[in-house]
Image (cartoon, rainbow, N blue to C red):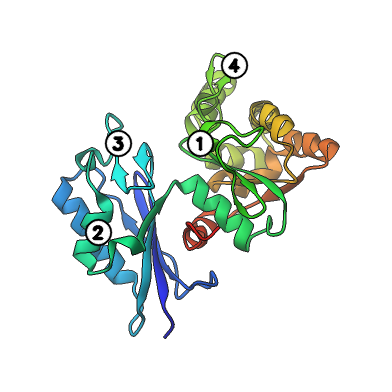
Amino acid sequence: MKDVFLCLDVGGTQIKGAAIGKDGEMCGNILYFGSRAGEGKGALLEHFAEILRRILPQGAEAAGIRMAFPGPFDYERGICLIRGLDKYESLYGADLRREISGRLGIGPQRVRFANDAAAFALGEMGFGQARGAERVLCACIGTGCGSAFGVAGRLAAEGTPGVPEEGYIYNAPFLEGCVDDYISRRGLMALTRERLGEALDGKALAGRAMEGDDAAGACFLAFGDRIRAALEPFLRAFRPDALCLGGQIMGSAALFLAPVEEFCMAAGIRVCITEDTSLRTLQGLTRIYTA
């Protein structure tokens, strides 16, 4: 069997893992594990190591280990900087490259890290609908609004015109707070509480809208209009050829995304909807430092 990358998408509640070839081909299914994000340093590191051992196909060799990890994190050096977020706090200051390398018996130079939104962008540009696009803006809507900008198949360099610092839009001022306050799961739940009298997540709101609840449908469209308003300054400044949107909520894109699509059509921007964000993120991890 050919060499594979062992790829993990580490989230606050769940870790997704898969073995993936250098060509982006999946070597088996994506496997899902609890994050155990509140445990101590030793237990967490062994948890990561055990997951990596489990996803290595029998007879295969690990070409490298790739991990998408939530921030704050020093991705270049592999140092976890999470503190005060009620997840992975025991790893604060830990050199995960050295720790993972030692547990798996693989050279530290072959253990690499990326922000999950950056990995998603690399996956879309390398293997998804944005393949071949010159300029790409990617956004994932979930617990927050992750983002990354791409130019010619690579992550946009710092200082690229129209690209905010580190490619992050989540902290940009928006309405009475920042983008993350509104374009996120909690943002949608606050909107439904305000308009419908109870907090609903995307799945519950979509269910009501599909059953013919006009108020729910209007609320979802209002969320879509907020997405358009939040993204518009970045779309105007960066002028991408393609806008790639991911996150579980994109399974209901037809119910709320019309305002974004109308703006992008007028601006000549192609909209790409990614329902399997996990797949693209894991595939994108194979392109760290090669794209």
Q: Position of residue 83 (x, y in %)?
A: 27, 32
Query: Relative to residue 290, is residue 233 depicted above or below?
Result: above
- Does residue 26 appear to the left or right of 227 in the view shown? left
Disc with the residue nearer the chain's start (3 vs 1): 3
- Does residue 288 appear to the left or right of 131 in the view shown? left
- Does residue 80 appear to the left or right of 122 in the view shown? left
Disc with the residue nearer the chain's start (4 vs 2): 2
Query: Relative to residue 287, is residue 75 depicted above or below?
Result: above
Do the numbered discs 4 and 1 sit on residues whose CB atoms are within 8 Å?
no
Please name which of the two marks, 3 or 4, marks the residue nearer to the observer. 3
Disc with the residue nearer the chain's start (4 vs 1): 1
Please name which of the two marks, 3 or 1, marks the residue nearer to the observer. 1
Identified by mark 1, the residue type is Glu
Q: Position of residue 36 (x, y in %)?
A: 25, 49
Q: Secondary structure at mark 3?
A: loop
Q: Secondary structure at mark 2?
A: helix
Residue assigned mark 2: 100
Q: Mark 2 packing: few (<14 Cα in 10 Å), some, or many (20+)?
A: many
Question: Nearest the camera: 241 or 207?
Answer: 241
Question: Nearest the camera: 193 or 79?
Answer: 79
Distance (Cα) linking label 4 and label 1: 22 Å
Distance (Cα) linking label 3 and label 1: 17 Å
